[in-house]
Amino acid sequence: MAAALDFYFDFSSPYGYFAAERIDAIAARHARAVDWRPFLLGVVFKTTGQTPLTEQPLRGDYARRDFARSARLYGLPFTWPERFPIPTQAAARAFYWLDAREPEAARALAKALYRAYFGAGRDISPPAVVIDIAAGLGVDGAALATALNDADVKDRLRRSTEAAIARGVFGSPMVFVDGEPFWGADRLDQVDRWLATGGW
């Protein structure tokens, strides 16, 4: 069986939101699975020296326009959140804890968190909000609350972020197809074509 696509994303990334809504369908067209890998973009920025796109002169104004335009293109609800960017440790830890038990449920949670933040403008940084969204999907809220403070879960996210950096991940989203990296939601059409043709 062909290798899974590696999908790296941060929950504070609008483009990650757009990619999360498309990546599984693209992979399925080519009989591929997707390995979802949240990481902490803030840690990556310390390595690259970058700042959030919206905080950059000139590019920030463009980016906010492009976020809304892209959402319309993809037919996705989009509400610019009052707080941006946000720390995403709670969301990413929740994903990894759930992924170790029910991978499909973890994916559903990731999409629900993205939709809450960028679709409805709800701040998903507080653990209580992550737990509430997860509980709405049938996840044991009490167990998740404990897991968010578990040393092993915290270490999983730390190691995953370090591994992403070691692999060359510098932004969200980033997809690897058989080792070939594609950065940005606007590169998913290239991912689709690469899978169909075997590359160029």
Image: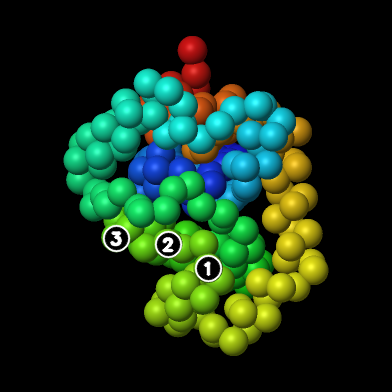
From this viewpoint, is residue 23 visible?
no
Q: Are marks 1 and 2 in contact (CB under 8 Å)?
A: yes
Q: Quadrant of residue 8?
A: top right
Q: Compared to 11, does 188 lie above or below?
A: above
Q: Quadrant of residue 154?
A: bottom right
- The residue positioned 62% from the left and 42% from the top of the image is 42
Along the line of sight, which residue is nearer the eye, 3 or 67?
Answer: 67
Which is closer to the viewer, label 2 or label 3? 2
Residue 85's label in the rendered image is none
Q: Which residue is mark 2?
A: 123
From this viewpoint, is residue 93 visible?
yes
Residue 108 image offset from top left, x and y in percent: 44, 64
Q: Amino acid at mark 2?
A: Asp
Q: Compared to 134, does 59 lie above or below?
A: above
The kind of secondary structure element at disc 1 is: loop
The kind of secondary structure element at disc 2 is: loop
Tell me how far mark 1 sits from mark 3, CA to CA.
16 Å
Q: Which residue is mark 1?
A: 126
State the scheme by which the image is colored. Answer: rainbow
Q: Compared to 41, does 135 lie above or below?
A: below
- The residue positioned 59% from the left and 50% from the top of the image is 38
Q: Amino acid at mark 3?
A: Ala
The kind of secondary structure element at disc 3 is: loop
Residue 46 image offset from top left, x and y in percent: 69, 34
Which is closer to the viewer, label 1 or label 3? 1
